[in-house]
Amino acid sequence: MAEKAKVSIGTVDRVLHNRGEVAESTKKKILAIVKELDYQPNILASTLASKKSALFATLFPEPPSPDGYWTRPAIGVKKRVTELRQYGIQVQPYTFSQTEPKSFSENANKILELKPDGVVFAPFYKKESNAFIQKLKELDIPFVFIDSEIKNAGQLGYIGQNSYQSGLVSGKLLDLILPEGNVLIIHFAKEMDNQNHLVQREKGFYDWYSKNKRTIHQLFTTEVPDTFEEKWMERVEKIIRDKNIKGIFVTNSKVYNVGRLIEKYKLFELKVIGHDLLKENVTFLKKDIVHFLICQRPEEQGYNAINKIFRYVVQKRATARENYTSIDIVTKENVDYYKEFKKEI
């Protein structure tokens, strides 16, 4: 390129890496040659030559069991880090309680003390996440959202489902299989209003019925902040009976709780939709107690989130703001074809 442009190699290097002053006419000539030759930089070689390693931190909810949903994104993170070992990439994982917002803040502060080159985290609690985001911005630390997002928060990007769209899909599915009766939306979550992704799923679900004028079904919502509560099943069963509930939508991965309730009270006529291919959920799917599971490919989310922050921090490459994963509809008839989940199933 230098020979063709009749300039020094140093001048070409300054244009390619946007360093130093180069005459505008010379810059245009070099860029035209770059386009003509379809020049692609050897990113691996240049990165290794710079001897730039990076430390990233992750902040995910703590899975309640070895088969829990949040074990999967962590597997995806480890897989991508292993592939990037020649770059010297390191990841420091942190977790927080799904029932205690305070634990999110405590571990977020540990990350701030670490001062990593980038952060991947689930903005599970909106209020605490906004406080964390503000401090990350002050330290100029780029961050990527996973699983749920806060719009226009200054994130490098988001990896996960469109939660609102997922709610719309769930609303349509339940409407299709429910000829009569009312619908109960159940949040198995504490401080629901602070959990943005569940709020968005609920909003999408309600909007499906509103936009399509499906007034033959009334919609009700209840929250179960703690399934260790002695009488939660009794309370929910009473709602089902009193409100003529024929369909249930669970906004997170704990739909197996509804499966247990149905077996206990023999409410097998209920139509049920929930989220995620957990082992317990698949058990009820195969029994026809849960009719649809909405899957969001959590391992893929972890993998792609680390890849995004790596490309930005180490490779200095621009990345797309949003990377929505597919909204998979899983039934008893197709669940065995999800090979990535064979071990759980």
Image (tube, grey):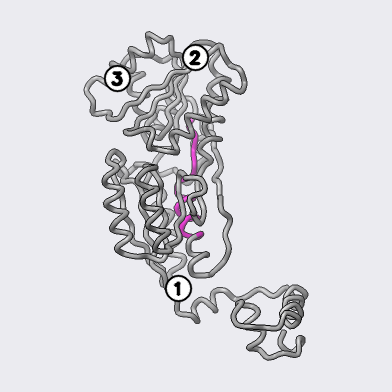
For label 2, the crowd category at 10 Å Cα-Cα, with few meaning under 14, some 14 to 19 and many 20 or more, is some
Q: Nearer the viewer, mark 3 or mark 1?
A: 3
x and y, in percent, of residue 335 in the image: 49, 35
Helix, strand or loop for disc 2: loop
Q: Nearer the viewer, residue 310 or 118?
A: 118
Q: Nearer the viewer, mark 2 or mark 1?
A: 2
x and y, in percent, of residue 82 in the image: 42, 64
Q: Which residues are magenta?
A: 293-308
Q: Nearer the viewer, residue 106 or 317?
A: 106
At a point 47% along the width and 19% down the height, the residue shown is 271
For the residue marked with disc 1, what is the amino acid?
Gln
Instruction: Place residue 39 in its image quadrant.
Output: bottom right
- Would you place residue 218 above or below residue 159 in this image? above
Helix, strand or loop for disc 1: helix
| Residue 86 circle label | 1
At a point 55% along the width and 26% down the height, the residue shown is 207
> Label 2 to label 3, Cα distance in Å?
21 Å
> Label 3 to label 1, Cα distance in Å?
52 Å
- Would you place residue 174 above or below residue 317 in this image? above
At a point 43% along the width and 31% down the height, the residue shown is 251
Q: Which residue is mark 3?
A: 233
Q: Which residue is mark 2?
A: 218
Q: Nearer the viewer, residue 263 or 171?
A: 171
For the residue marked with disc 2, what is the amino acid?
Gln
Q: Residue furthest left?
A: 230
For the residue marked with disc 3, what is the amino acid?
Met
- Would you place residue 331 above or below residue 46 in this image? above
x and y, in percent, of residue 278 in the image: 39, 37
Magenta span: chief secondary structure:
helix
**Magenta highlight on residue 125:** no
Of marks 2 and 3, which one's residue comes earlier in the chain? 2
